[in-house]
Image (spheres, grey):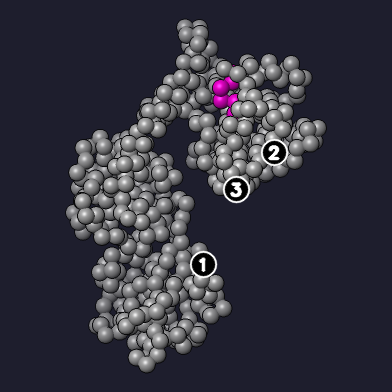
Amino acid sequence: MALPTSDDWSAWQPSGAAGWLIAFSGGLDSTVLLHLAARAGLPLRAIHVHHGLSDDADAWVEHCQVECGRLGIPLMVAHVAPDVRSGGVQAGARAARYSAMDKALATDEVLATAHHADDQAETVLLRLLRGTGVDGLSGIPRSTRFGGGWLVRPLLDARRDEIEAFARSEGLRWVEDPANAGERYQRSRLRSRTIPALTRETPNLVDSLSRLAAAAADERDLRAWLMDAQLERATGDGHDGLSVDILKTLPGFVQQGLLRHWIRKGGQRPPGRRRLIAGLDALLGAGVDRHPVIEWPEGRVARHDGWLYRLPAVLPDRPQQTRLGPDSRQADGAFPWRDAGSIVASPADGTPGVSREILQQPLWIRPAAPGERVRLSGRPSRLLREYFREAGVPPWWRDRWPVIINAAGETIAVPGIGVTQAGLAPPSEPRLRLDWRPAGRVDGPDWHWPGSPPPLPNA
């Protein structure tokens, strides 16, 4: 194991990346990382996250400013307020730190953090103690996509004593966080007690755990490659939902692996094994008219019309009523409804449509109301939810679906469903079809689908 060379930095820089953002806490590891990056001649800047959790936090900012000033490296200081109520201090600080770095990272930048081989060993041991699966044994990845850019860990092959020896030989200065020396947290106890005891039995423990992580990562990548072929068969053309019928044809262990892989591909962390197995039974075993859901802290999967959808862990609030006017129309002709999505107008081509003249009048968009009835042109008055059911609208969209009303409160149209007599264009006038185009969400990759595709031909 060794510290990275200039050639290593070049090899790790992804194609399309133009610069580096160094996560600089001022501690030993990030100080060495910063100096190695500067020595490699990289275009770089640094970020220091002020968590406000230590009495020394302001002094650490001043130290980082001095060090970056000596190297001529621009430093950004991000002040955060960690939420420590649910996951504790460490988890809250980590979430706030990575959120700040995500916001600071440019789309052509690489974020570099100072995780090293001893951190990798601690991570693998912690996950073993918590009963991790094979993916968890892969530990900390060398590189990954992060936000709009990338995340690379250049020191992952270096031992802590190598890093400290380099810092002392170069006369570097760094700060010490007293929390790292205490035993309040499990990781700190592993570092101070468990790993030294295991190292006395197995002197090459850190190297062995690093090899285990690398082997597990290879197995994970191989399984992902194999699962991609199954996923291509089980998802729709241009639709990323997962086919229930295809899943049912697979052995149970493949069902579990494919569901986990599909969830992870959407950017969500899958649920634990027991919850996933129980949820899978519910998702596949329910009747065709049922809509079972599996929920966990990082996400949810819901079934609708023979397909599975990855949704946000917490569903968005219903959008508020909004004025719809000609001046709100976007360049592509769509009418935005806050951040929920857009209403798209296109020629009706022989079917009942909205009058262009009416779209010039004062109109409003509001969400569909529970128990609401509507009378579409040429059809009897019915509950709106019955029209939604006929159109294949998923249950989670039915009380968020847009309804267009005029100044008198009359319903003009329900985009994607139909137009009422109050909004109907006369036969002699051009008519427009209105459709609803939901906005995508990072925390729910299938949220933007307003309906299901037809069943797959090989299901």
Q: Residue furthest top?
A: 201
- The kind of residue on which mark 2 rests is Leu
Q: Quadrant of residue 152?
A: top right
The residue nearer to you, when weighing 300 against 152, is 152
Which residue does the numbered mark 2 point to in the structure image? 44
Could you tell me residue 184's position as x and y percent? 55, 25
Point 44% across, 72% down: residue: 344
On the image, the x and y values in percent for residue 221 come to: 40, 33
Q: Secondary structure at mark 3?
A: loop
Residue range of the region highlighted in magenta in the rendering? 154-159
- Numbered tag placed on residue 107 in the rendering: 3
Task: Tell me if 5 is positioned left or right of 295 in this view.
Answer: right
Q: Which mark is residue 338?
A: 1
Q: Inspect this view and state whether residue 110 appears.
A: yes
Residue 430 vertical position relative to residue 393 in the rendered view, above or below = below
Amino acid at the residue labelled 3: Thr
Q: Residue at x 41, y 59 (%)?
A: 448
